[in-house]
Image (cartoon, coloured by chain):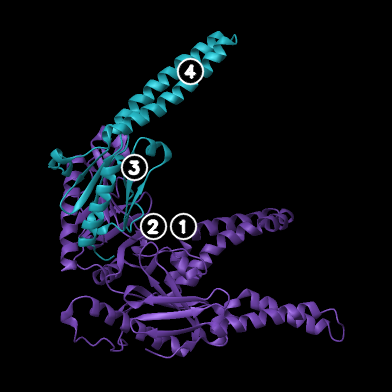
Amino acid sequence: MSIEEAQSGSWWSPSPRLLVLRRLEVATLTLAALSAAGVVAALGHTTIGLACLGGALVLGLAAERFVSRRFHAWGYAEREDDLLVRRGVMFSRLSVVPYGRMQFIDVTAGPLERSFGLATVRMHTAAAASDARIPGLDRAEAARLRDRLAEVGEAQAAGL
Amino acid sequence: MTEWKRLHPLSPIVRGGRATIAVGTVLLLSLLAGRGSRGSTPELVIVGIVVVLGFVSWFVTRWRIDGDDLRIESGVLRRQSLRFPLSQVQAIDIVRPGLARIFGVAELRLRTGGSSGDTARLAYLASHEAEPLRTRLLALAEGARVHEGTREHEGAPASEPADQEHVLTTVPTGRLVASVLISDVGILAEAVLAALIATALLSPSAAAAVIGGGAVWIFAVLTPVWRRFNQEYRLSLAEAPDGLRLRSGLIALSAETIRPGRVQAVRMVEPLLWRALGWCRLEVDLAGKQRSKGEGQAERRPLRTVLPVGSRALAEELLERIVPDRPGVQSPPPRRTLLKSPLRYRMLAWGRSETCVATTSGRIRRVTVWAPLEKVQSLRRVQGPLQRRLHLATVHVDTAGHSVHAAIRDRDTAEADRALADLSELARAERRKKAR
């Protein structure tokens, strides 16, 4: 049985507000494209304008679908000795990062994330390729995760 | 604790490197040309300032061993005091560039691990002092670690000079030349030279122009060949109580010690043409920053070459010392991998033991990587769109090294999942064993 299935009960996902944020981003872009296409249509190039309108709509819907699938792909699980992080739709990844190997943990929040009360937690190990991060966590959950990782990491810290 | 000591008085001259040569030339020219005339005064003033600055920088730089730390102080306006914990030292190198050899001095370089790993440089010391000092620092480093770690080694002789070493191999020059000539960089250089010679023979009139215009290219293709030869000339590997000792160099000599347990991963490279001769090359990856300002060429090498060229049997023998309990690689990937990686398919394989994982990959050359499980930083299972269609997945084994990457490529999904679970379990056991 794979690690992923063994942990089936204990996967956590980012806050649903992340999905709202991502959808808003897509919607804004789509609306901008739609209005641009509308202006083109109104200026007399009707066929080109309508084609662009349709194209923008299709692209927007595709992006929405992609964004929501990607949101559902994110997940993390705390095991006894390591943290599991899964992500990605096209390229699906599952990282196993032992607590003892984490050198430091970043919690960052950009302006958009902040207005939604979200934060990103990023785990750093001595290997540059590790790159484990969890975006769109509720701020309280991000702080809890950071404190817990730091605590367990200290207890299990191993040298290089 | 010892007294504060200064570096060798000639250090600023050697440190100046090319600048020293330039200043010397200017001085010589102005002396020759400027006999009697006053035109050379500005040059002399500048040279004077440079000399005074060099002297001041030498005068304010001092070092000493303070318990388990090495302390270096330098600078006038921006006073800098470095405290370097010896227990963190990954390796201590002795480097002697061309100019340093002329003046009989050597540089001692201490490297620590971690991605923010720092380098302490003692540039320069008298040659005869460098070797004993390195032995002493290594002994202290070993002692500091024993002190920090398990108490049962308390009585272990920490200051015992580690001088008894046992040379494992020295690369014969003939074989090195041959191997460089049929390596990738060598073949490129030969092709360019052959093309130039052919042009010269066919139309001597055009040749001059071609060579004039192509000088940069000739230089560009010859530099890596020369660098490789220079670095690996008479490379010898010795086993000593404080680790593996590497010595090499034609013009710039370098000597370094790789401490046991600091190797993050080992790889064996077999280029296409070398395989026909049964040759291979062995490189080890260490933790720590690879590129930083003020470091010489030797330091920028991404990997430490342990064996520039040698037979498989010799490589196996060395591997036995670097990664004991080393698994063989077996089990080819499923046939459908041919669709995903047609060139790699023949090379792909992996294997594991209780303490180590081995993988092979490569398209034209074959690269075999061994990563000790105790060094594993994280594990990743990655599946791309094509791999999902074919029910394949790749498991990456990340270590703190920078250049060697172990990846179990394109295995059946179930096998990859099992490998991920097993390896994370085994790596955890190894970490626990070490922590205890």
Under mark 2, the amino acid is Pro
Q: Which mark is residue B271?
A: 2
Question: Callout 4 environment at 10 Å: few (<14), some (14 to 19), or many (20+)?
Answer: many
Among the two numbered marks 3 and 4 on one chain, the one whose residue lies closer to the N terminus: 4
Subunit bearing disc 1 = B
Q: CA distance from mark 2 to mark 4?
A: 55 Å
The N terminus of chain A - image quarter: top left
> Residue A152 occupies which quadrant of the picture?
bottom left
Q: CA distance from mark 1 to mark 2?
A: 8 Å
Q: Which mark is residue A119?
A: 3
Chain shaded purple: B
Whether residue B5 is situated above or below residue B352 in the rendered picture: below
- Residue B108 horizontal side relative to residue B361, left or right: right
Whether residue B412 is situated above or below residue B277 in the rendered picture: above
Check disc 4 and report the residue beneath it: A34
Q: CA distance from mark 1 to mark 3?
A: 48 Å
Question: Callout 2 environment at 10 Å: few (<14), some (14 to 19), or many (20+)?
Answer: many
